[in-house]
Each structure stands twice: as C-alpha cells, then as structure tokens.
Amino acid sequence: MLRRKLESFGETLPALPLAAFFLVAFVAPLVLLFVISLFESTEFHSIGAHQYVKFVIDGFSIGVLWDTLFLGFCVTAVCLLLAYPLGLVYLEGGARLRALILFLILLPLLTSAVVRTFAWLVILGREGIINNAMLALGLWGQPARLLYTWGGLIVALAQIQLPLLALPVINSLLKVDKSLIDAAEGLGASSWRRFWTVILPLTLPGAVAGGLLVFAASTTAFITQTLVGGGRIVLMPLNIYQQAVGVQDWPFAAALSIVFLLIIVAITWLINAFAQARMRGVNAA
Amino acid sequence: MQMSRRTALRLGAASLATAGLPALARAAEAVVATTYPGSFDEAFKAVVGPAFTKATGANVSFTPLLAIDQVAKIQAARANPPFDVVLFDEGPLINAIKADVLEKFPASAAKTLADIPEAFQHPDGYAPVVTCQVIGIAFNPKKVKAPPTSWDDLWKPEYKGRVGITGMASSLGTAFMVDVAKLKGGSDTDIEPAFKAMQTLLPNVGAIAQSPGALAALFQQGEIDIAFNYFNNIELLRAKGVDVDFVAPSTGAIVVRTSAQLVKNAPAGKLATAYLETIMSEAVQKDLEATPWVMMPTNKKVPFTGANLKLAKGLDDLIGKNKLLDWNKFQHLRGDWITRFTKEVKI
C-alpha cells in the first residue's frame, strides 16, 4: 500500500517544478492583485468591496467592458468566416497548394504582433496604401478614415489572430471522414446543406478551441488595440493601464483586471460547455 | 579538430568572462537613464550618451518611456529600481517626491548649479531642470495658409476633422487644458471651462493620440493639420522635411520644466551624479540647443541660436514672455482629470 503510494508520488514528481513555478509566477500575483483590489483607496488603509461598487455605479467602465467583449465577438466572427473557406480550399487542394496555404498562415506568426500592427498602420493610414490606391484610381474623392475606427481595428485584429483559428479548423477538417460527406452528397444534400449538417458539426471542436483563443487574444490585445484603435477607442486593457499608470489608482485598476478576467473566464467556460453539449448531441445522433 | 587542454580552458574562461560582462557592466560601468519617446530620445542618444562616455569612460543606456510609466516602474521596484536616472516633467516630479523614490542632488556637485537660473533650481534640493519644453501650436503650413495666432484657431470650422489632441496623462495635454481653462475664466484648480470647450472642439478632432510623440507623428502621416505640441518635437520633424511649423500663441506659450533626477537605491551611485553633471555642462547644453535638436538650454552660458531665436532672445526672455504653471496647485487633481478626459473626450 505504502509502496504504491510512494510510486504514484514518484510519478507526479516531474510535474512538481512546473506546479511550483505556476504557484509563484501565476497564482501568487493573482492573489496579490485580488488583495490590492479590496483596498478602499490609494492610501491602502481599509478593506472592502468599494472598488467593485465603483465599477458597477460608474457606467463608463461597464460600457468599456461591453465594447471590449463586442470587439472579441466581431473579431472571432470575422476569423471564422475567413478560416472555413480557407480550410475547405486546403482540404481540396493538392500538396503544393496545401504547403502554400500553410506557409501563408504560419508566416505572420513569425513576426511580432508589434510589427504586424505597424504594417496595418501603413495600410490603413490617411496617406496609406488603401487610401492612396483608391484616390489614384479615382474611386474615392477624398481619403476615407480607416485608422482609429472600429472597422479598421476588427480587420487588423482578425488578420493578426487568424492563425490561432485557421490551424485548429484545418486540423479538424482533415479528421472529418470523407465518406460522410460523400454519403450526404449521394443522398442529395446541397453543398450548403452538407456544410451545415455534416462539416460544421464535426469540426465544431476545432472551431470552438480556435475561436476561444482568438476571443481571448483579441480582447486583451493591448498593443494592437491602442495603436490601431488610437486614443479614440477605449477598451479594457487601455482602461486598466490608464487607471494603474496614468491615474495611479492601483486598487481600482486591480478591481477592473479581476472583473475583466472573471468575465473572460466565464464566457470561455460557457461557450465550451455549450459546444460540449452540442457535440454530445452529434455523437448520440 | 584536436584541442589541447590549455586551449579548451582558455576558450572556456573567455566565454565565461563574456557571459559575465553584462552583469558587471550593470554593477559599475554604466548608467541606465530614461528619456521621453520622440525627439528627446534621439537628442539624448546623439549628444548626451557620447559626451558622458568621453567624460567618464562609462556607458549609458537609454530607455524611452513616458514619465508616468517611469514613476510606476520605480515605485514597483523600490529596492532594485530599473533606472539610475529618471526624467520628469513638473507634475510627475511632485508624485515621485511624494512617493519617496528620489535622492536629493548631492552637495558635492553643487558647483554645477552656479550656471542654472533660480527658476530652474529645485526649492527642496532635488536635481535642477535640464531643459524646458515649450508648448504652442503646431500646424501644416501647406494646409493651414495663415499661421494660427491663438488656441482658438483649433476651434475654427475649416479644420473639421483635422485637429489632433492628446489626453491629460501627459504634461502636454494637462498644460493645454489648464491654460485654456484660465483663458476662459477658470483657474489652476477649476478647469471646467476647458472641459466645456473640449466638447465644442470634438467635431474638429480627427485623432486622439496616445502620447505627445505620437501626436507629432500624426503630422508625418498626414492624419492631422493642426494641434498643440512641443516646440522641439515639431522642429525635429521640420528638420526631417515634414510639412510642419510651430508658433507660440499670442497669449504666450507654456513652458514645462523637465529635470533629470537620481533614483533612490540605484546601483550607479556617483556615476549617476556625473551623468547629471554631463547633461548640465555648457558643452552638452550647447549641442542639445543646436539644430536639429533645438532643446531649450538651462545653462545661462549657452546662448540661443537658430530656430530657438524664433521663440525668444535668450533664457530670461523665454521665461519672461511665456508662462510657467504652478503644478503643485493641481497635480493632486490630475487623476480625476485624466479619468474624466478619457470619459468625456471621445469621438
């Protein structure tokens, strides 16, 4: 009995350094953050839920939170719309086309997010590539505002985060049993119906996994949000930065971070639970 | 390849020495100093860095960072601060002194103070002002035909969507708001008139930049035609061939005093003081004053030349006809102002 216990302890031993690292580098700061959020004021005297009440009463921060979540959903939706056609082309393509698509998806991952963001500044600027091209072609009378807009931010973030979704989607597309699609076709299902009733449900795990990554990454993408959104679009990361560094109100900044973290975790958990229920349904059917 | 034991040992020792070098350098041979992003950073790297190495044989590494980020970083690591010398405008300096993260200017270096005017010495013995920044109106002369004369020009309907601003987290945004408030019947502590005025400015605002440097860069990108900004940011862009010019408003430009300060518990010690002395020395101030940096000198022995003559005949004239703000009066209100500005000034 004792021996078996010792053996199982021995098996978990290699995981201990990682667990210790996690405890020190992740859990401890998180606890500290939570403790800071409980202080009533920047003088760090009394403790209470003051900062959380402030968050609820103060309509501004809630608005910012909604905007941030909205941005996350939009970016994820755009990525989904782009990833599936890309994945289907990959599925049908020959070896050379597949290699090319994979290369193009991976290429952006090899440069830093800052560089990719600056590329978008060059593309979207008032004297940027799009505006200059449209003006030169005579299609636009005057330069359009593309930078510092919601549209610009969503497109830029979607391009930057696309690999996170495209790779899992392609992976699950590859795993779909081709005979199921052939069977659906044989039974007279249109290509749309084949997509909606066969391909989409079967690739849902990949889409959900990738979608959650894109959602979490785009809601917290401080650099891209501030550079492409500019000072005109205030989202949670910038709001937290301003409260922590600009205003030096650490308790409120900590409370904002905790709320933001919990909301993101709750949403990912809900979507995951929903997807798992759906998948159980698919498997049962 | 055959390698004798001696060669192997020698190689090993050499690689160990190289690996240990950065740590040694941090301990004694280098000063880590901050600059502001933009023209400040370029000027310090080009002028102050080489001069310091020549004078002391030591190196200095520069980190461009906004003042508010500097305060946050040294406050977060009091015992082992990431910088030896920090650069502060008047507002952040008040916060940093209150947070007790700064060392006073050592009496041993007092001889350098002789050349610095009274207005640029710190009343409580912290390091003196090393340069001042002049805030006025920046504009694109190709688009704005008649040079602007007052802040009111920003509100002109013809600049719809072409005005750039930046928030109150920067000295630039705060100084602008306080000055506008005072001109419109407010005071150092009551800037309500300025917040009201910002609402009527919104239709003209084409971009809200994250920092003064980013605001200046918007001229380069053609995003804006007119904005409030720092003189030396704009002069540097002009020297690079960007269509941009600078005027002081008829009511007077605002002068913001910037000082380099010694950080408490910083490892560089005496070397950091030597770095401050380098910045204040006549030779370095002369080079910083020259084209293209045109940074305002604070050493009385350095005469104004070139573009700086457009603003004033010399140091006394500059202070005489422009405005200094008393940041002690409103620094404690800035937190609320920054938050309110972010909430209300949205386009």
Image (cartoon, coloured by chain):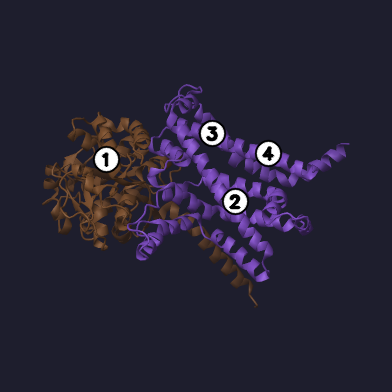
For the residue labelled by badge 1, is the local secondary structure a helix, a strand or a loop? helix
Measure the C-alpha gap from mark 4 to mark 2.
Answer: 17 Å
Q: Single out the mark in the foreground, 3 or 4.
A: 4
> Which comes before the other along the chain, label 3 or label 2?
2
* Residue at the image position 16 percent from the left and 44 percent from the top: B150
Q: Are marks 1 and 2 in contact (CB under 8 Å)?
A: no
| Mark 2, residue position | A80
Neighbourhood count class around disc 4 (C-alpha, 10 Å): few under 14, some 14–19, many 20 upward: few
Q: Are marks 1 and 2 on the same chain?
A: no
| Mark 3, residue position | A258
Measure the C-alpha gap from mark 3 to mark 2.
Answer: 29 Å
Image position, residue A142 (x, y; %): 32, 57
Q: Tell me the subunit letter for badge 3.
A: A
Q: Which chain is brown?
A: B
Q: Which chain is purple?
A: A
Image position, residue B42 (x, y; %): 32, 57
| Mark 1, residue position | B201
Residue B303, by quadrant, is bottom left
* Residue at the image position 57 percent from the left and 35 percent from the top: A263
Neighbourhood count class around disc 3 (C-alpha, 10 Å): few under 14, some 14–19, many 20 upward: some
Q: Label 1 is placed on what type of residue?
A: Leu
Q: Label 2 is placed on what type of residue?
A: Leu
Q: In screen coordinates, is A204 left or right of A63?
A: right
For the residue labelled by badge 4, is the local secondary structure a helix, a strand or a loop? helix
Q: Which mark is residue A274?
A: 4
Q: Single out the mark in the foreground, 1 or 3.
A: 1
Q: Is residue B89 visible?
A: no
Measure the C-alpha gap from mark 1 to mark 3.
Answer: 35 Å
